[in-house]
Protein backbone atom coordinates (compact mmCIF):
# COMPACT_ATOMS: atom_id res chain seq x y z
CA UNK A 1 0.00 0.00 0.00
CA UNK A 2 1.11 3.55 -0.68
CA UNK A 3 2.83 5.10 2.28
CA UNK A 4 1.62 8.60 1.64
CA UNK A 5 0.78 11.09 4.33
CA UNK A 6 -2.87 11.77 4.88
CA UNK A 7 -2.90 15.51 5.42
CA UNK A 8 -6.07 15.62 7.44
CA UNK A 9 -6.83 18.11 10.13
CA UNK A 10 -9.64 19.79 11.93
CA UNK A 11 -11.76 21.90 9.65
CA UNK A 12 -12.92 23.93 12.61
CA UNK A 13 -11.55 27.35 13.52
CA UNK A 14 -7.86 27.01 12.73
CA UNK A 15 -4.83 24.89 13.39
CA UNK A 16 -1.22 25.97 13.18
CA UNK A 17 0.06 22.37 13.27
CA UNK A 18 -1.81 20.16 10.80
CA UNK A 19 -1.87 16.54 11.94
CA UNK A 20 -0.13 14.22 9.53
CA UNK A 21 -1.26 10.64 9.66
CA UNK A 22 1.36 8.28 8.25
CA UNK A 23 0.32 4.75 7.39
CA UNK A 24 3.75 3.69 8.62
CA UNK A 25 4.22 5.59 11.91
CA UNK A 26 8.01 5.04 11.77
CA UNK A 27 8.06 7.66 9.01
CA UNK A 28 6.56 10.24 11.36
CA UNK A 29 9.21 12.68 12.60
CA UNK A 30 7.84 12.31 16.17
CA UNK A 31 8.24 8.53 16.17
CA UNK A 32 11.67 8.40 17.88
CA UNK A 33 10.57 10.87 20.54
CA UNK A 34 7.54 8.70 21.26
CA UNK A 35 9.75 5.60 21.69
CA UNK A 36 12.07 7.51 24.01
CA UNK A 37 9.19 8.74 26.16
CA UNK A 38 7.67 5.27 26.28
CA UNK A 39 10.93 3.92 27.71
CA UNK A 40 11.03 6.79 30.22
CA UNK A 41 7.48 5.94 31.31
CA UNK A 42 8.22 2.24 31.73
CA UNK A 43 11.37 3.04 33.70
CA UNK A 44 9.40 5.28 36.06
CA UNK A 45 6.58 2.73 36.42
CA UNK A 46 9.02 0.01 37.51
CA UNK A 47 8.63 -3.75 37.26
CA UNK A 48 6.80 -6.48 39.11
CA UNK A 49 8.77 -7.60 42.18
CA UNK A 50 10.25 -4.20 43.04
CA UNK A 51 7.88 -3.68 45.96
CA UNK A 52 5.52 -1.48 43.96
CA UNK A 53 1.92 -1.75 42.87
CA UNK A 54 0.47 -0.31 39.64
CA UNK A 55 -0.78 3.23 40.23
CA UNK A 56 -4.50 3.92 40.07
CA UNK A 57 -5.26 7.05 38.05
CA UNK A 58 -8.75 8.56 38.01
CA UNK A 59 -9.78 10.74 35.06
CA UNK A 60 -12.44 13.17 36.18
CA UNK A 61 -14.06 16.33 34.84
CA UNK A 62 -17.36 17.86 33.77
CA UNK A 63 -19.70 15.95 31.42
CA UNK A 64 -18.68 15.65 27.76
CA UNK A 65 -15.25 17.31 28.09
CA UNK A 66 -13.37 14.41 26.46
CA UNK A 67 -12.43 12.17 29.43
CA UNK A 68 -13.05 8.86 27.64
CA UNK A 69 -11.44 10.14 24.44
CA UNK A 70 -8.42 11.18 26.51
CA UNK A 71 -8.17 7.68 27.98
CA UNK A 72 -8.24 6.16 24.48
CA UNK A 73 -5.51 8.63 23.50
CA UNK A 74 -3.38 7.48 26.49
CA UNK A 75 -3.89 3.85 25.44
CA UNK A 76 -2.87 4.69 21.85
CA UNK A 77 0.20 6.48 23.21
CA UNK A 78 1.19 3.28 25.07
CA UNK A 79 0.54 1.22 21.92
CA UNK A 80 2.75 0.38 18.94
CA UNK A 81 0.11 -0.45 16.38
CA UNK A 82 -3.19 1.45 16.41
CA UNK A 83 -5.83 3.39 18.29
CA UNK A 84 -8.65 1.31 19.81
CA UNK A 85 -11.87 2.40 21.45
CA UNK A 86 -11.43 0.87 24.89
CA UNK A 87 -13.39 3.58 26.73
CA UNK A 88 -16.72 4.32 25.06
CA UNK A 89 -16.84 7.92 23.90
CA UNK A 90 -19.48 9.90 22.05
CA UNK A 91 -21.45 13.03 21.58
CA UNK A 92 -22.74 14.34 24.88
CA UNK A 93 -26.13 15.97 25.00
CA UNK A 94 -28.06 14.00 22.39
CA UNK A 95 -30.61 12.67 24.85
CA UNK A 96 -29.19 14.73 27.67
CA UNK A 97 -27.40 11.62 28.85
CA UNK A 98 -23.74 11.21 29.50
CA UNK A 99 -21.99 8.56 27.48
CA UNK A 100 -20.01 7.16 30.43
CA UNK A 101 -22.34 6.38 33.29
CA UNK A 102 -20.71 3.52 35.17
CA UNK A 103 -17.27 3.31 36.74
CA UNK A 104 -14.93 1.48 34.38
CA UNK A 105 -11.40 0.43 35.22
CA UNK A 106 -8.75 -0.26 32.58
CA UNK A 107 -5.89 -2.39 33.79
CA UNK A 108 -2.65 -2.80 31.84
CA UNK A 109 -3.81 -6.15 30.42
CA UNK A 110 -6.76 -4.40 28.73
CA UNK A 111 -4.88 -1.71 26.83
CA UNK A 112 -1.29 -2.95 26.52
CA UNK A 113 -0.32 -5.83 24.25
CA UNK A 114 3.44 -6.20 24.93
CA UNK A 115 4.37 -9.10 27.16
CA UNK A 116 6.60 -7.36 29.67
CA UNK A 117 6.54 -6.91 33.44
CA UNK A 118 6.26 -3.12 33.63
CA UNK A 119 3.71 -1.90 36.14
CA UNK A 120 1.64 0.29 33.87
CA UNK A 121 -1.20 2.04 35.72
CA UNK A 122 -4.85 1.18 36.08
CA UNK A 123 -7.08 4.00 34.81
CA UNK A 124 -10.59 4.84 35.99
CA UNK A 125 -13.23 6.38 33.74
CA UNK A 126 -16.50 7.60 35.15
CA UNK A 127 -19.44 9.90 34.72
CA UNK A 128 -18.87 13.66 34.74
CA UNK A 129 -19.17 15.60 38.00
CA UNK A 130 -21.51 18.53 38.53
CA UNK A 131 -19.91 21.96 38.94
CA UNK A 132 -20.74 22.19 42.67
CA UNK A 133 -18.78 22.58 45.86
CA UNK A 134 -21.54 21.06 48.00
CA UNK A 135 -21.06 18.54 50.83
CA UNK A 136 -22.72 15.86 48.66
CA UNK A 137 -20.48 16.47 45.64
CA UNK A 138 -17.43 16.40 47.93
CA UNK A 139 -18.63 13.13 49.42
CA UNK A 140 -18.98 11.66 45.91
CA UNK A 141 -15.41 12.71 45.12
CA UNK A 142 -14.20 11.19 48.40
CA UNK A 143 -16.01 7.92 47.59
CA UNK A 144 -14.24 7.72 44.22
CA UNK A 145 -10.80 8.74 45.52
CA UNK A 146 -10.95 6.29 48.43
CA UNK A 147 -11.91 3.46 46.08
CA UNK A 148 -15.37 2.92 47.54
CA UNK A 149 -17.16 2.85 44.19
CA UNK A 150 -16.99 -0.59 42.57
CA UNK A 151 -16.74 -1.66 38.94
CA UNK A 152 -19.84 -0.82 36.89
CA UNK A 153 -21.43 1.14 39.71
CA UNK A 154 -23.16 4.41 38.87
CA UNK A 155 -22.09 7.56 40.63
CA UNK A 156 -25.51 9.02 39.87
CA UNK A 157 -27.13 6.31 42.00
CA UNK A 158 -24.99 7.42 44.94
CA UNK A 159 -26.00 11.01 44.20
CA UNK A 160 -29.70 10.01 44.14
CA UNK A 161 -29.26 8.12 47.40
CA UNK A 162 -27.63 11.21 48.92
CA UNK A 163 -30.40 13.51 47.70
CA UNK A 164 -32.98 11.16 49.23
CA UNK A 165 -31.37 10.34 52.57
CA UNK A 166 -28.81 13.10 53.06
CA UNK A 167 -25.04 13.27 52.99
CA UNK A 168 -24.65 11.59 56.41
CA UNK A 169 -26.42 8.48 55.14
CA UNK A 170 -23.98 8.38 52.19
CA UNK A 171 -21.06 8.76 54.59
CA UNK A 172 -22.34 5.96 56.78
CA UNK A 173 -23.05 3.70 53.84
CA UNK A 174 -19.61 4.06 52.29
CA UNK A 175 -17.33 4.86 55.21
CA UNK A 176 -19.17 3.90 58.41
CA UNK A 177 -16.68 1.84 60.38
CA UNK A 178 -18.31 -1.40 61.48
CA UNK A 179 -21.61 0.16 60.58
CA UNK A 180 -24.23 -2.38 59.82
CA UNK A 181 -27.69 -1.02 59.37
CA UNK A 182 -30.81 -1.14 57.30
CA UNK A 183 -32.73 1.51 55.48
CA UNK A 184 -36.20 1.30 54.09
CA UNK A 185 -36.45 1.38 50.31
CA UNK A 186 -38.61 4.21 49.00
CA UNK A 187 -39.37 2.54 45.69
CA UNK A 188 -40.67 -0.73 47.08
CA UNK A 189 -41.70 -3.12 44.31
CA UNK A 190 -44.26 -4.86 46.53
CA UNK A 191 -47.77 -3.49 46.51
CA UNK A 192 -48.84 -5.50 49.56
CA UNK A 193 -48.41 -3.20 52.60
CA UNK A 194 -47.19 -6.11 54.74
CA UNK A 195 -44.29 -6.88 52.36
CA UNK A 196 -43.60 -3.18 51.98
CA UNK A 197 -42.57 -3.07 55.63
CA UNK A 198 -40.12 -5.91 55.08
CA UNK A 199 -38.51 -4.40 52.02
CA UNK A 200 -35.26 -3.16 53.49
CA UNK A 201 -31.77 -2.96 52.10
CA UNK A 202 -28.81 -3.83 54.25
CA UNK A 203 -26.06 -1.23 54.58
CA UNK A 204 -22.60 -2.67 54.95
CA UNK A 205 -19.31 -0.95 55.39
CA UNK A 206 -17.79 -0.98 51.95
CA UNK A 207 -14.68 -2.84 50.86
CA UNK A 208 -12.02 -0.73 49.19
CA UNK A 209 -11.99 -1.37 45.45
CA UNK A 210 -9.35 0.76 43.73
CA UNK A 211 -7.85 3.49 45.89
CA UNK A 212 -6.77 6.40 43.73
CA UNK A 213 -3.12 7.59 43.66
CA UNK A 214 -3.33 10.33 41.02
CA UNK A 215 -6.12 12.41 39.53
CA UNK A 216 -6.22 13.91 36.07
CA UNK A 217 -8.79 16.70 35.84
CA UNK A 218 -9.94 17.08 32.25
CA UNK A 219 -11.64 20.12 30.76
CA UNK A 220 -12.24 21.48 27.28
CA UNK A 221 -9.87 24.18 25.97
CA UNK A 222 -12.92 26.01 24.61
CA UNK A 223 -12.54 29.56 26.01
CA UNK A 224 -16.29 30.19 25.65
CA UNK A 225 -17.12 27.47 28.15
CA UNK A 226 -17.18 28.41 31.80
CA UNK A 227 -14.47 26.70 33.86
CA UNK A 228 -16.10 24.44 36.50
CA UNK A 229 -14.42 26.34 39.33
CA UNK A 230 -16.75 25.08 42.08
CA UNK A 231 -15.91 21.49 41.11
CA UNK A 232 -12.19 22.37 41.11
CA UNK A 233 -12.55 23.86 44.59
CA UNK A 234 -14.22 20.68 45.82
CA UNK A 235 -11.51 18.50 44.23
CA UNK A 236 -8.65 20.57 45.71
CA UNK A 237 -10.36 20.58 49.07
CA UNK A 238 -10.75 16.81 49.19
CA UNK A 239 -7.28 16.02 47.84
CA UNK A 240 -5.56 18.45 50.23
CA UNK A 241 -7.57 17.69 53.32
CA UNK A 242 -8.61 14.09 53.09
CA UNK A 243 -5.91 12.42 51.08
CA UNK A 244 -2.53 13.28 49.76
CA UNK A 245 -3.26 12.75 46.05
CA UNK A 246 -1.41 14.64 43.32
CA UNK A 247 -3.54 16.53 40.82
CA UNK A 248 -2.82 16.83 37.10
CA UNK A 249 -4.70 18.91 34.54
CA UNK A 250 -5.51 18.40 30.86
CA UNK A 251 -7.24 20.69 28.40
CA UNK A 252 -8.65 18.79 25.41
CA UNK A 253 -9.65 19.99 21.94
CA UNK A 254 -6.36 21.81 21.35
CA UNK A 255 -6.86 21.02 17.63
CA UNK A 256 -9.60 23.67 17.51
CA UNK A 257 -7.36 26.60 18.47
CA UNK A 258 -4.05 28.12 17.52
CA UNK A 259 -1.38 27.31 20.07
CA UNK A 260 -0.78 31.03 20.76
CA UNK A 261 -4.50 31.93 20.91
CA UNK A 262 -4.61 34.47 23.75
CA UNK A 263 -8.06 33.35 24.94
CA UNK A 264 -6.89 29.76 25.29
CA UNK A 265 -3.62 30.81 26.94
CA UNK A 266 -5.67 32.79 29.47
CA UNK A 267 -7.90 29.77 30.04
CA UNK A 268 -4.80 27.62 30.59
CA UNK A 269 -3.52 30.00 33.29
CA UNK A 270 -6.93 30.16 34.99
CA UNK A 271 -7.29 26.37 34.82
CA UNK A 272 -3.90 25.81 36.46
CA UNK A 273 -4.53 28.50 39.07
CA UNK A 274 -7.95 27.11 39.98
CA UNK A 275 -6.51 23.61 40.45
CA UNK A 276 -3.33 24.88 42.07
CA UNK A 277 -1.07 22.93 39.71
CA UNK A 278 2.29 23.94 38.20
CA UNK A 279 2.98 23.83 34.45
CA UNK A 280 4.78 20.46 34.54
CA UNK A 281 1.54 18.84 35.72
CA UNK A 282 -0.47 20.32 32.88
CA UNK A 283 -0.92 19.46 29.17
CA UNK A 284 -2.98 20.90 26.35
CA UNK A 285 -3.71 17.94 24.11
CA UNK A 286 -5.45 16.81 20.92
CA UNK A 287 -7.36 13.60 21.31
CA UNK A 288 -7.63 10.93 18.65
CA UNK A 289 -11.05 11.80 17.23
CA UNK A 290 -12.80 12.22 13.85
CA UNK A 291 -12.13 15.99 13.90
CA UNK A 292 -8.39 15.23 13.77
CA UNK A 293 -8.66 12.62 11.05
CA UNK A 294 -12.12 12.37 9.40
CA UNK A 295 -11.11 9.12 7.64
CA UNK A 296 -10.22 7.61 11.01
CA UNK A 297 -6.99 6.21 9.57
CA UNK A 298 -5.88 5.85 13.19
CA UNK A 299 -7.97 2.68 13.45
CA UNK A 300 -5.06 1.08 11.56
CA UNK A 301 -2.17 3.13 12.89
CA UNK A 302 -0.97 5.52 15.60
CA UNK A 303 -0.22 9.24 15.38
CA UNK A 304 3.06 9.90 17.26
CA UNK A 305 2.55 13.69 17.22
CA UNK A 306 -0.59 13.20 19.37
CA UNK A 307 1.14 10.67 21.63
CA UNK A 308 4.17 12.79 22.54
CA UNK A 309 2.45 15.43 24.78
CA UNK A 310 0.43 12.67 26.47
CA UNK A 311 3.52 10.57 27.20
CA UNK A 312 5.34 13.62 28.57
CA UNK A 313 2.53 14.09 31.06
CA UNK A 314 2.53 10.35 31.84
CA UNK A 315 6.27 10.42 32.53
CA UNK A 316 5.72 13.11 35.15
CA UNK A 317 2.70 11.33 36.55
CA UNK A 318 4.49 7.98 36.93
CA UNK A 319 7.31 9.52 38.96
CA UNK A 320 7.29 7.78 42.35
CA UNK A 321 5.96 9.64 45.38
CA UNK A 322 6.33 8.79 49.08
CA UNK A 323 2.58 8.13 49.32
CA UNK A 324 2.74 5.42 46.60
CA UNK A 325 3.16 2.70 49.16
CA UNK A 326 2.69 -0.95 48.53
CA UNK A 327 1.28 -2.03 51.85
CA UNK A 328 1.67 -5.73 51.12
CA UNK A 329 5.38 -5.69 50.28
CA UNK A 330 8.49 -3.88 51.39
CA UNK A 331 12.02 -3.77 50.05
CA UNK A 332 14.93 -5.13 52.10
CA UNK A 333 18.35 -3.43 52.24
CA UNK A 334 19.68 -5.68 49.47
CA UNK A 335 16.75 -4.79 47.21
CA UNK A 336 14.63 -7.94 47.72
CA UNK A 337 10.84 -7.66 47.77
CA UNK A 338 9.37 -9.38 50.84
CA UNK A 339 5.90 -9.42 52.49
CA UNK A 340 5.35 -6.46 54.75
CA UNK A 341 4.62 -7.76 58.25
CA UNK A 342 3.40 -4.38 59.47
CA UNK A 343 0.32 -4.88 57.30
CA UNK A 344 -2.32 -6.23 59.75
CA UNK A 345 -3.58 -8.82 57.27
CA UNK A 346 -0.16 -10.22 56.40
CA UNK A 347 0.84 -10.07 60.09
CA UNK A 348 -2.26 -12.08 61.02
CA UNK A 349 -1.48 -14.74 58.43
CA UNK A 350 2.15 -14.87 59.57
CA UNK A 351 1.03 -15.21 63.21
CA UNK A 352 -1.35 -18.04 62.27
CA UNK A 353 1.44 -19.88 60.43
CA UNK A 354 3.80 -19.51 63.43
CA UNK A 355 1.13 -20.75 65.87
CA UNK A 356 0.41 -23.72 63.58
CA UNK A 357 4.13 -24.56 63.44
CA UNK A 358 4.52 -24.33 67.24
CA UNK A 359 1.47 -26.56 67.73
CA UNK A 360 2.84 -29.04 65.25
CA UNK A 361 6.24 -29.17 67.03
CA UNK A 362 4.51 -29.59 70.42
CA UNK A 363 2.39 -32.37 68.99
CA UNK A 364 5.46 -34.21 67.65
CA UNK A 365 7.25 -33.78 71.01
CA UNK A 366 4.21 -35.09 72.84
CA UNK A 367 4.06 -38.15 70.56
CA UNK A 368 7.78 -38.80 71.07
CA UNK A 369 7.38 -38.54 74.89
CA UNK A 370 4.51 -41.01 74.81
CA UNK A 371 6.62 -43.38 72.70
CA UNK A 372 9.62 -43.16 75.08
CA UNK A 373 7.44 -43.64 78.15
CA UNK A 374 5.98 -46.81 76.61
CA UNK A 375 9.44 -48.20 75.90
N1 LIG B 1 -12.05 18.13 18.14
C1 LIG B 1 -11.93 17.41 19.25
N2 LIG B 1 -13.00 16.71 19.72
C2 LIG B 1 -12.84 15.98 20.86
C3 LIG B 1 -11.61 15.93 21.57
N3 LIG B 1 -11.77 15.15 22.66
C4 LIG B 1 -13.03 14.71 22.62
N4 LIG B 1 -13.69 15.20 21.55
C5 LIG B 1 -15.08 14.93 21.18
O1 LIG B 1 -15.93 15.32 22.27
C6 LIG B 1 -17.05 14.43 22.38
C7 LIG B 1 -17.17 13.90 23.81
O2 LIG B 1 -16.05 13.09 24.10
P1 LIG B 1 -16.06 12.00 25.28
O3 LIG B 1 -14.68 11.44 25.32
O4 LIG B 1 -17.17 11.04 25.15
O5 LIG B 1 -16.31 12.93 26.56
P2 LIG B 1 -16.59 12.46 28.07
O6 LIG B 1 -16.04 13.52 28.96
O7 LIG B 1 -16.07 11.09 28.29
O8 LIG B 1 -18.18 12.47 28.10
P3 LIG B 1 -19.17 11.81 29.20
O9 LIG B 1 -18.71 10.41 29.45
O10 LIG B 1 -20.49 11.86 28.50
O11 LIG B 1 -19.12 12.68 30.41
C8 LIG B 1 -16.81 13.33 21.33
O12 LIG B 1 -17.59 13.62 20.20
C9 LIG B 1 -15.33 13.44 21.00
O13 LIG B 1 -15.04 13.04 19.67
C10 LIG B 1 -10.50 16.69 21.05
O14 LIG B 1 -9.39 16.73 21.60
N5 LIG B 1 -10.73 17.40 19.88
MG1 LIG C 1 -17.00 9.38 28.94
Image (cartoon, rainbow, N blue to C red):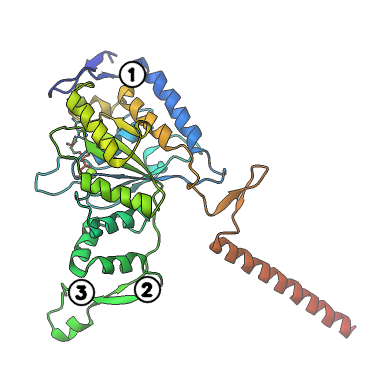
- Nearer mark to the viewer, of 3 and 2: 2
Q: Is residue 176 among the parts visible in the rendering?
A: yes
| Vertical placement of residue 252 versus 31, above or below | below
Q: CA separation, marks 3 and 1?
A: 58 Å
Identity of the residue drawn at 33% across and 18% down: 24
User: What residue is pinned by disc 2?
Assistant: 179
Q: CA separation, marks 3 and 2?
A: 18 Å
Q: Earlier in the sequence, mark 3 or mark 2?
A: 2
| Vertical placement of residue 210 versus 345, above or below | above
Quarter of the image with the C terminus is: bottom right
Query: To which quarter of the image does residue 26 belong?
Result: top left
| Vertical placement of residue 18 versus 234, above or below | above
Ligand 1 neighbours mark 1 (CB distance < 8 Å): no
Q: x%, y% of residue 258? A: 20, 21
Q: Earlier in the sequence, mark 3 or mark 1?
A: 1
- Nearer mark to the viewer, of 3 and 1: 3
Q: x%, y% of residue 162? A: 22, 64
User: What residue is pinned by disc 3?
Assistant: 185
| Image mark for residue 48 | none
Query: To which quarter of the image does residue 29 belong?
Result: top left
* Quadrant of ligand 1 in image: top left
Q: Determine crowd level at label 2: few under 14, some 14-19, many 20+ residues with C-alpha closer than 10 A.
A: some
Identity of the residue drawn at 16% across and 75% down: 188
User: What residue is pinned by disc 1?
Assistant: 24
Q: Earlier in the sequence, mark 1 or mark 2?
A: 1
Q: Is residue 295 among the parts visible in the rendering?
A: no
Q: x%, y% of residue 347? A: 59, 63
Q: CA separation, marks 1 and 2?
A: 58 Å
Residue 54 or residue 216, whichever sits in front: 216
Q: x%, y% of residue 261? A: 19, 23
Q: Circles 1 and 2: CB distance less than 8 Å? A: no
- Secondary structure of the residue carrying numbered label 1: loop
Amino acid sequence: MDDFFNRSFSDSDSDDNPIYVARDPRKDKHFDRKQELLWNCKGKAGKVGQGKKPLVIAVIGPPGCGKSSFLNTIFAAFSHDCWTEHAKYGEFGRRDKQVTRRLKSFQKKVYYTDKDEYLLPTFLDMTGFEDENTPLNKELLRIVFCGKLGEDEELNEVRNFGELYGVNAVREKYFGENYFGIYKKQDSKFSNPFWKYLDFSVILNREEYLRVNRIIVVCSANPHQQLPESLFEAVSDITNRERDITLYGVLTQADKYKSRDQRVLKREREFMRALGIPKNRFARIKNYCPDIDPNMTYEDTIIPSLDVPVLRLMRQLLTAEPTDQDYEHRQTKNGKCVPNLSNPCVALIAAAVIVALVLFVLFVLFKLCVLFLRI
